[in-house]
Amino acid sequence: MKTVNVAIVGATGAVGQQMMKQLEKRKLKIDRIVFLSSSRSAGTEIEFNGKTYTVREAVPESFKGIDIALFSAGGSVSKALAAEAVKHGALVIDNTSAFRMDPEVPLVVPEVNKEDIGKHKGIIANPNCSTIQMVCALKPLKEQFGLKKVIVSTYQAVSGAGIDAIDELQNQAADYEEAKTADAKILPVKSAEKHYPIAYNVIPQIDLFEDNGYTFEEMKMINETKKILHDDTLQVAATCVRLPVVTGHSESVYVELDGAPSLAEFRNALAGAPGVEVQDDPVNQVYPMPLLSEGLDEVFVGRIRKDLDNPNGFHLWIVSDNLVKGAALNSVQIAEAFVESFN
Ligand code: NAP
Ligand code: 3JM
């Protein structure tokens, strides 16, 4: 495989740190790597592959000589700097929602729509974490049985909202009585008017509300799923909820298929899907959970059941590490596929 020069924008963040771990353990051959952040962390040192590197402030010139720029510093940073990176000849793999629905920008989960990488014009978008794990399971169902409708409720970890949200949960978690009056500044959304404690709580809001009553996180799941599966007619509804879990998003998903497979046929389709592992043995209490998925690459699927009323309906439970397959691993897989097949 060709050797590449890589930049990580947002290297000091929850996603950036996981990107470094993925690059350390996977197959992309790196010649030069630069670690970029805001001016706040510029000058601090980080370890990568046994060497010490100084974090630099991300500026347009940071991308000189860079082949692949992995962005995860928020949408405003991507909007300000992605075009600069492209101007310097880099391929941008963007982890934010800034460009995901841009028709010129492929939105890619390699196990699902790797071929879309070839359509890029300088930027490839990495989908939202909750979307990624869901489409990995939906793809084989769509291919084998046809997919008509998806209704999902998510149970999302605080690490999806960054390092400050992890700190907020851990600081509040010390005492139940204290949590009721806890100082909440980050969740549900830093920029929102009101904040609520997440310790000992469940918050049915991720990101800001849109005029239609859905949150932006819910609309991301709805629109991104249709784009990745190339199906505008697919019916999708989502309810996104934040839980006091550090890492690992869970999802309860109802699917309505065109066909009416047996439970065994449905399960086999999932078991054969790339990146998916079926963990489904209710008699022995085997099912996916966030604590068991932490640090792992797979999308875990369990609690597979036929709907009791609709022969075309099935229920499933999907869990994956939101910082691994939901963010860093997926971005690094896109980079690997790009270098291997599309460069
Ligand atoms: P985080 O832990 O809060 O880290 C934010 C990172 O962005 C830090 O490295 C920070 O640097 C850097 N940053 C902030 N402002 C910057 C600026 N003006 N210029 C350059 N760097 C800047 O957040 P995170 O969880 O890693 O998430 C970062 C972003 O990734 C999110 O906003 C979201 O858009 C995206 N994300 C995507 C997924 C996904 O599902 N694909 C999941 C989670 C997050 P300092 O250390 O200097 O502050
Ligand atoms: C901004 O769990 C989460 O909050 C989702 C991750 C996230 C995103 C995203 O990837 O969609 C956190 C903060 C964004 C965004 O819109 O880029």
Image (spheres, rainbow, N blue to C red):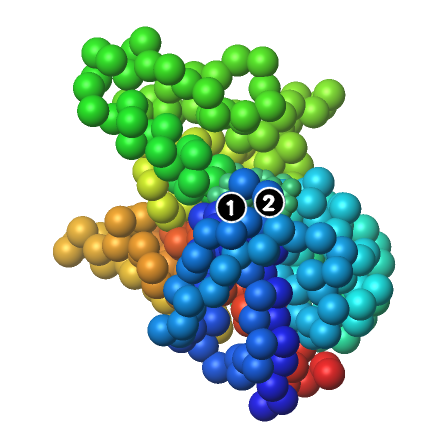
Answer whether labels 2 and 1 touch (C-beta < 8 Å). yes
Q: Nearer the viewer, residue 104 or 238?
A: 104
Residue 300 figure quarter? bottom left
Q: Is mark 2 within 8 Å of ligand 1?
A: yes
**In the current view of this chain or complex, which residue is farthest to the top?**
181
Percent x, y of residue 220: 65, 41
The relative height of residue 179 versus residue 167 in the rendered view (above or below) is: above
Q: Residue at x 80, y 67 (%)?
A: 88
SS category of the residue bearing label 1: loop
Q: Is mark 1 within 8 Å of ligand 1?
A: yes
- Left or right for 138, reference 219: left
Please name the amino acid that badge 1 sits on.
Ser
SS category of the residue bearing label 2: loop
What's the mark number on residue 298? Answer: none
Q: Nearer the viewer, residue 162 or 313?
A: 162
Percent x, y of residue 213: 66, 21
Please name the amino acid that badge 2 sits on.
Ser
- The answer, for residue 156, to whether it is visible in the render is no
Residue 93 figure quarter? bottom right
Q: Residue at x 76, y 46 (%)?
A: 79
Assess disc 1: are there few (<14), some (14-19) or many (≥20) residues with their C-alpha within 10 Å of its C-alpha: some
What's the mark number on residue 38? Answer: 2
Look at the image and tell me in which quarter the N terminus lies: bottom right
Percent x, y of residue 116: 73, 70
Percent x, y of residue 207: 58, 30
Q: Nearer the viewer, residue 60 or 239?
A: 60
Whereabouts is ligand 2, in terms of quadrant? Answer: top right
**Mark 1 highlights which residue?**
41
- The answer, for residue 212, to whether it is visible in the render is yes
Assess disc 2: are there few (<14), some (14-19) or many (≥20) residues with their C-alpha within 10 Å of its C-alpha: some
The relative height of residue 267 versus residue 3 in the rendered view (above or below) is: above
